[in-house]
Image (spheres, rainbow, N blue to C red):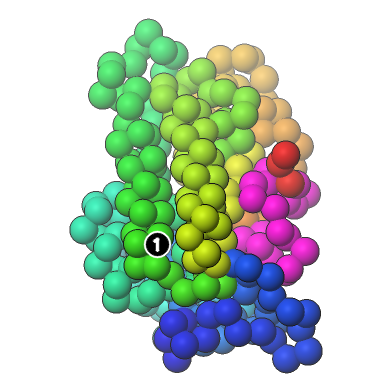
Amino acid sequence: MNAKSSVGRQASGAEPAGPGRIVMSENELAGVTALVTGASRGFGRGIATALSRAGAQVVGVARDRAPLEGLRAELGESFTPVAADAADPMVAGALIDKYHPGVLVLNAGATPLPRPIQHHTWQTFSRNWDVDVAHVFHWTREALLAPLEPGSTVITLSSGAALFGSPLSGGYAGAKAAIRFLTAYAAEESRRGGLGIRFVSVLPQLTPATDLGAVFAAAYAAREGTEAAARSGGEPLTPEQAGQAITALVTDPGHDQDAYLLAAAGLRPLP
């Protein structure tokens, strides 16, 4: 079943759904299409796996086909691999039109060079604006224009760096802050247009459990002379935990805020 025919429905015995919410019980994502960008590794892979195991039909988008095919072998027919550049506006429009997802998770992004500011060029400094921000802009625009069905949820992956900075990653922190703003702008347009699409941003902590996080945990450890785990702040956030958190945002009506910090201990609402 395509999500277009099932998004916005209520689970049997569930509380009434408010605007822009899919209210479902555990394992009640059956019939919902979830599209995840950057699905081949790290948080994206953990999110795709969790949504699939919750019953969703997951479309995973990433540049490299091989790891997507590996995930397909693991998850079976509930996972559809799409090898494409998520930052390409043509890809965003084509896949929104083809799959019309009820859950859209925008996770794709570039790994910045771990250098202090004076060792960046403008091209390396602005890389995350050209990839991460452009990708969120294209997909949120298409979600609003389509529009997605009332009750759909769009989740964007920002970063704790958006709040605390990241002096070794060029424009990364600013780009992730822009993603949070873009998400809030889209939420306001959904409200103004009566579209019933929920937009929420998630700001994960730095963690050595992903490829990007491992690079920067090590870089900051070398810069500060501390253990790599120290900068991530306690227990490292894992892709599996990220997947569980994103699934909870979709299925638990108690998660009704517009932005959350995400650590190993779970989600914490931001003002």
Residue 97 lies in the magenta-colored region: no
Q: Is residue 228 visible?
A: no
Q: What's the residue at 24%, 52% (across, down)?
A: 88
Q: What residue would you read off at disc 1? A: 143
Up-down relation of residue 76 to residue 170 (above or below): below
Q: Nearer the viewer, residue 16 or 76?
A: 16
In which quadrant of the rendered view does residue 234 lie? Answer: top right
Task: Report the magenta residues as a range.
Answer: 245-268
Helix, strand or loop under label 1: helix
In the displayed structure, does residue 215 sit left or right of residue 18?
left
Q: Is residue 195 visible?
A: yes
Residue 253 lies in the magenta-colored region: yes
Q: What's the residue at 61%, 78% (across, down)?
A: 54
Q: Position of residue 101 (x, y in %)?
A: 43, 73
Q: Residues within 10 Å of mark 1 (few under 14, many from 20)?
A: many
Quarter of the rendering occupied by the N terminus: bottom left
Q: Position of residue 16 (x, y in %)?
A: 74, 79
Q: Position of residue 39 (x, y in %)?
A: 42, 61
